[in-house]
Each structure stands twice: as structure tokens, then as C-alpha cells.
């Protein structure tokens, strides 16, 4: 897919719509740590997000330790953030809200 890298103003506008995410100092990635009650809830979150990621053809950098899932989103092809990063972030937030 051909993704267009967002300019700084667009990144700031999109970032302002998110809750609980951090913008990396370089401005090229966003990060969030999701916390759940159990490993099963964390794993269910990851499974749901994997389906969303596959539909968007955009895959997160993430790790899981028991009930925590750490997520980093960036578009490697553009070496920065694109609309698709923010779409996946919103899908992840929605999936998380069903478990907390």
C-alpha cells in the first residue's frame, strides 16, 4: 500500500483525538501500554486487534507480559506516522474498552 506521511500539524491534530497515547519525541511513532485484569483478557485484546490490523494491512510492534500489552505504531515505509496508524490506534482503544 502507498501511505502518505502526515506533516507535523496533521500528526498533532490526529494525536489530540487519542486518549492515553504518547507521541514519541521524534514525532514518528505513538505508544500506549494497555493493562487488563488477566492474561486471557490481554490475549483476547491482541487477537481482536490482530484482526483489525490485518483488515487495515498495518501491523503493530507490540509485546505482551501477563496482563499488559505495549504497543508502538508507526509506518515504516514512510518512516513516520500516517492516517493508518491513527485508525489502528482508535480500533485498539475500542477493543480495550470492551475488556475494561
Image (tube, rainbow, N blue to C red):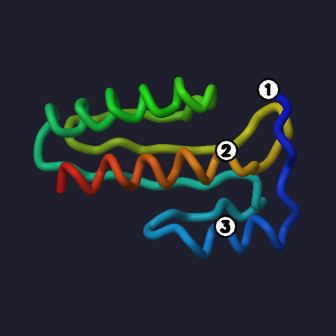
Any mark on residue 93, and which?
A: none
Determine which residue is flagged by label 3.
14
Residues at badges 1 and 2 in contact (C-beta under 8 Å)? yes
Instruction: Tell me the SS state at disc 3.
Output: helix
Is residue 15 rendered to the left or right of residue 12?
Answer: left
Asked whether, in this view, residue 43 is left or right of residue 37, the answer is right
Residue at 53% from the left image edge and 24% from the top image edge: 54
Q: How many numbered tags mark residues here? A: 3
Residue 20, by quadrant, is: bottom left
Which mark is on residue 84? Answer: 2
Query: Between disc 3 and disc 1, whose residue precedes?
Result: 1
Q: Closest to the observer: 95 or 42?
A: 95
Which comes sooner in the sequence, label 3 or label 2?
3
Residue placed at 24% from the left, 38% from the top? 42
Give neighbour class at mark 3: few <14, some 14-19, many 20+ (Cα, 10 Å).
some
Tell me where residue 97 appears, x and y as whole percent: 27, 56
Which corner quadrant holds the N terminus? top right
Q: What secondary structure is found at the residue carrying circle 1?
A: loop
- Residue 24 place in picture, x, y as percent: 66, 60
* Residue located beneath label 1 in the image: 1
Amino acid at each position: 500500500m502507498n501511505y502518505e506521511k502526515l506533516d507535523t500539524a496533521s500528526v498533532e491534530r490526529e494525536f489530540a483525538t487519542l486518549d492515553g497515547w504518547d507521541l514519541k519525541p521524534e514525532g514518528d511513532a505513538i505508544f500506549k501500554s494497555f493493562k487488563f485484569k488477566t492474561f486471557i483478557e490481554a490475549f483476547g485484546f491482541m487477537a481482536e486487534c490482530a484482526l483489525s490490523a490485518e483488515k487495515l494491512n498495518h501491523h503493530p510492534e507490540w509485546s505482551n507480559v501477563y496482563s499488559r500489552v505495549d504497543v508502538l505504531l508507526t509506518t515504516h515505509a514512510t518512516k513516520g506516522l500516517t492516517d493508518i496508524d491513527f485508525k489502528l490506534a482508535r480500533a485498539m482503544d475500542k477493543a480495550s474498552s470492551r475488556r475494561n
